[in-house]
Image: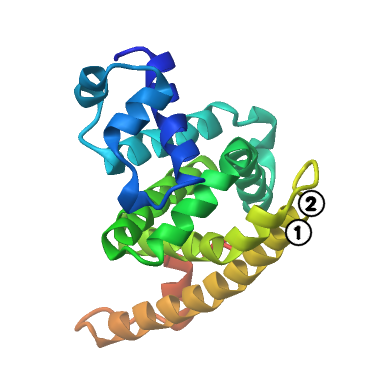
Amino acid sequence: MNDDGPTRRAEEALLGLLAETPFRDVRLVDVATRAGVPLADLRRAYEGPLDILSGFTRRIDVAVLEGDDPAMAGEPIKDRLLDALMRRYDLLAPHRPGLEGLARSARRDPVLAVHLARLLIGSQAWILEASGVSANGPYGAAKAAALSAALVRLAPTFFADAEAGLPKTMAALDAALDRLGRLAERTGRVRARCRSILTRCRPGKRETTATAEAAGEAIDPAI
């Protein structure tokens, strides 16, 4: 099961089943049957249902990154994020019934919820990097987590948005990125002040607040 065809069918089969069945009740043999692949091949490719979800997420991430428009490189970070995230929503749209079922299951299954949170945060780290925002280190991880939390809140809008082009989803995402931008600005100012205080407290290193802030990491206005 090394080629993309059977693998993709298995992932889409799981999403199809999740539109009808709670995650805890999905059987691997049903996934294999729906996908039209031998159960042995399914085992060869995946550890279990959670691993199939991981494979699906990775495939969507790759498609988002491959669809990056080089012409967007000079655009503001918020615009690049909006473009990348809307590409992601476009790719996820055909699977909305299964994703909505998955979200319902996660509310009742802490293990599933933790796994999905890890996948979502990992996806957003890649999107941040593709949009020109560092996702490295604790502060980068916090950015990815904040963006993920915003997307979780936006999920009901996406699930209900049946119009072509997902206009309601785009409007809600645009507003969410604005809120994250304001939060990032406040967080950046606090970090700059903390660096300034720590610098002044170090023996032999007397720098003004302005100097310390100028030497610090620039505040990202988008996330």
Q: How is the image coloured?
A: rainbow
Q: Identify residue type, mark 1.
A: Ala
At a point 25% along the width and 87% down the height, the residue shown is 201
Where disc 1 sits, the SS reads: helix
Q: Are marks 1 and 2 in contact (CB under 8 Å)?
A: yes
Reply above or below: 202 against 66: below
Residue that mark 2 sits on: 167
Mark number displayed over residue 20: none
Q: Where is residue 100 shown, x and y percent of the image?
A: 54, 53
Estimate how packed mark 2 is, as few (under 14), some (14 to 19) or many (20 or more) residues with alpha carbons within 10 Å: some
Q: Where is residue 137 shown, x and y percent of the image?
A: 30, 57
Question: Is 16 displayed left or right of 160 in the figure?
Answer: left
Q: Where is residue 35 shown, x and y percent of the image?
A: 41, 23
Q: Can residue 66 be seen by looking at this rendering? A: yes
Q: Quadrant of residue 160?
A: bottom right
The quadrant the C terminus occupies is bottom right
Residue that mark 1 sits on: 171
At a point 61% along the width and 73% down the height, the residue shown is 182
Reply above or below: 110 against 15: below
At a point 67% along the width and 50% down the height, the residue shown is 76
Q: Say how many tags the image has.
A: 2
Where disc 2 sits, the SS reads: helix
Q: Where is residue 141 shown, x and y percent of the image?
A: 36, 59
